[in-house]
């Protein structure tokens, strides 16, 4: 929807349609935890390439967040967008040195983040579960489904036509691409397409050796009572996510419900997209860890627990570019679990590629990046299982 919006913005005469297999928000965008974060995943509190690139990606991604805010204001749509910043909470004391170092380098480059000790972290987040945290004033949270609905309204107001229940089952490449759509095998002919199908993309036969669909989970509590709110002491209401591999992310929504997600993830053989987990176990896992963070919430219930599909790449770098013999199959995907802001940004990057507009992203090595190779099955499943178990082991060490 971001690509569609940006395409119409840059060239109102373009005929832009969205084909959605189920309904808007069926994918990760309707299921995420609501954190809107600067930086691509590889640059989150680490310098993947060099400090200049780090500074550039920080600048472009924070500008993108401001662009979302301006767009929602312009259309007077409320998505519970809060941009007071967020925290990256540090679990292991031994990691503090790393973050001291990182914050010093980032500050030198003009990135306005702060390292908070355990006392200040508790003062702001209410929990004594963390050894420290890094506060970033750029970023925050929004309501996933409200944001989807907002983008729908905005895109449609510009003339984008959205077809739901319209699964693309086959892409026949050519100068004019033919898309086979739905049970009736309708044919859509077009000059260019954009694959914005994230974790579902390999089902269409693209990026099989570049991406992994991984199943993750989130839950939302019933609304907290005024007494529960006071007891947890999360006065700043700043969203936060922790420093584990299977990190937890927490957002205190405007309606006083806590959205908590993370804790574990799973890859199924051959990239099976059907969820095979046990949602009761997920409920218990998320509740146990929520209570470690806020013990005074003992007895609280989740109103809803759900899963969703993330799109992982071998090197955690999201992909935006163009492929196919006719160079008319554009793609934006692989956000590695950090895609609320990035998918909006990549919509702009792709629209820019198609309409000859600079998004600024072409100044970074992330533009048209060729991500690492992921071997075929069964090696992919064995490798994924091995890595996931290794990450779980590392996480247990710091608990
Ligand atoms: C549980 C969970 C929590 C998360 N929390 C956060 C968070 O707090 N912050 C953050 O930044 N990121 C988070 N993420 C990641 C973020 O949600 C995603 O990166 C982002 O929403 C991806 O958006 P997208 O539009 O590219 O893909 P999706 O939202 O997955 O959309 C892809 C769409 O394509 C459709 N589709 C698939 N195949 C076809 C086909 N053949 N034909 C037509 N349509 C098709 C699907 O139905 C789907 O609606 C989370 C993800 C999950 C799963």
Image (tube, helix red, strand yellow):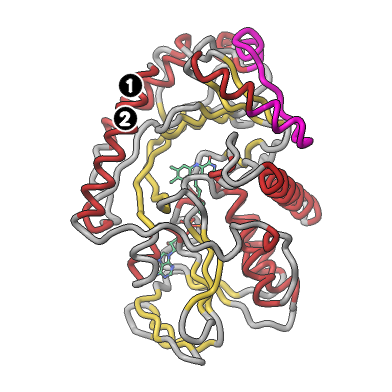
Distance from the alpha carbon under mark 2 to that under mark 1 = 6 Å
Which residue is depicted at the point 69% across and 70% down?
Answer: 352
Report which quarter residue 235 is drawn in.
top right
Q: Is residue 343 above or below residue 141?
A: below
Q: Which mark is residue 218?
A: none
The reply to whether the C-beta atoms of the residues labelled 2 and 1 are less than 8 Å apart is yes
Question: 287 and 164: which one is in front?
Answer: 287
**Magenta residue span:** 102-124
Which residue is depicted at the point 33% across and 21% down?
Answer: 396
Q: Residue furthest front?
A: 50
Q: Is residue 142 above or below residue 182?
A: above
Q: Residues within 10 Å of mark 2 (few under 14, many from 20)?
A: some
Q: Residues within 10 Å of mark 1 (few under 14, many from 20)?
A: few
Question: 328 and 186: which one is in front?
Answer: 328
User: Is 226 one of the magenta-colored residues?
Assistant: no
Task: Give the percent coordinates (x, y) of residue 329.
Answer: 51, 77
Task: Give the percent coordinates (x, y) of residue 330.
Answer: 54, 73
Residue 166 appears left or right of 110: left
Q: Residue furthest left?
A: 378
Q: Is residue 397 above or below residue 366?
A: above
Main secondary structure of the magenta stretch: helix
Task: Give the percent coordinates (x, y) of residue 191.
Answer: 56, 87
Residue 226 appears left or right of 114: left
Q: Quadrant of the C terminus?
A: top left
Tag 2 residue = 392
Q: Quadrant of the N terminus?
A: bottom right
- Asked which secondary structure carries label 1, the reply is helix
Tag 1 residue = 396
């Amino acid at each position: 929807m971001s690509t569609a919006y940006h395409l119409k913005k840059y060239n109102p005469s373009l005929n832009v349609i969205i084909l959605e297999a189920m309904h808007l928000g069926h994918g990760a965008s309707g299921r995420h935890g609501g954190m809107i974060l600067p930086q691509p995943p590889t640059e989150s509190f680490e310098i993947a390439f060099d400090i200049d690139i780090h500074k550039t990606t920080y600048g472009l991604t924070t500008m993108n967040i401001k662009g979302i805010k301006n767009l929602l204001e312009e259309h007077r749509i409320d998505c519970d967008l809060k941009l007071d910043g967020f925290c990256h909470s540090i679990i292991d004391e031994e990691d503090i040195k790393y973050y001291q170092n990182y914050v010093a380098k980032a500050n030198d480059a003009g990135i306005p983040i702060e390292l908070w000790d355990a006392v200040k972290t508790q003062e702001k987040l209410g929990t004594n579960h963390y050894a420290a945290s890094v506060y970033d004033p750029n970023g925050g949270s929004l309501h996933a489904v409200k944001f989807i609905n907002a983008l729908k309204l905005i895109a449609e107001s510009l003339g984008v036509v959205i077809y739901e229940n319209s699964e693309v089952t086959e892409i026949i490449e050519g100068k004019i691409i033919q898309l086979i759509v739905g049970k009736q095998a309708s044919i859509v002919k077009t000059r260019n397409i954009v694959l914005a199908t994230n974790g579902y993309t390999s089902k269409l036969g693209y990026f099989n050796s570049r991406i992994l669909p991984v199943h993750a989970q989130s839950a939302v509590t019933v609304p907290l009572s005024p007494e529960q709110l006071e007891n947890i002491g999360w006065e700043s209401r700043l969203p936060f996510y922790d420093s584990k591999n299977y990190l937890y992310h927490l957002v205190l929504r405007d309606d006083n419900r806590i959205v908590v997600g993370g804790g574990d993830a799973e890859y199924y053989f051959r990239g099976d997209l059907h969820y095979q987990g046990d949602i009761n176990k997920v409920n218990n896992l998320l509740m146990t860890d929520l209570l470690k963070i806020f013990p005074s919430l003992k007895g609280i219930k989740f109103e809803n627990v759900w899963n969703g599909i993330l799109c992982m790449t071998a090197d955690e770098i999201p992909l935006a570019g163009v492929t196919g013999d006719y160079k008319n199959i554009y793609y934006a995907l692989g956000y590695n679990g950090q895609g609320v802001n990035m998918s909006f940004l990549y919509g702009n990057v792709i629209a820019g590629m198609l309409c000859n507009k600079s998004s600024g992203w072409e100044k970074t090595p992330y533009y048209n990046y060729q991500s690492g190779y992921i071997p075929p099955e069964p090696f992919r499943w064995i490798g994924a299982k091995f890595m996931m178990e290794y990450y779980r082991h590392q996480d247990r060490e710091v608990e």
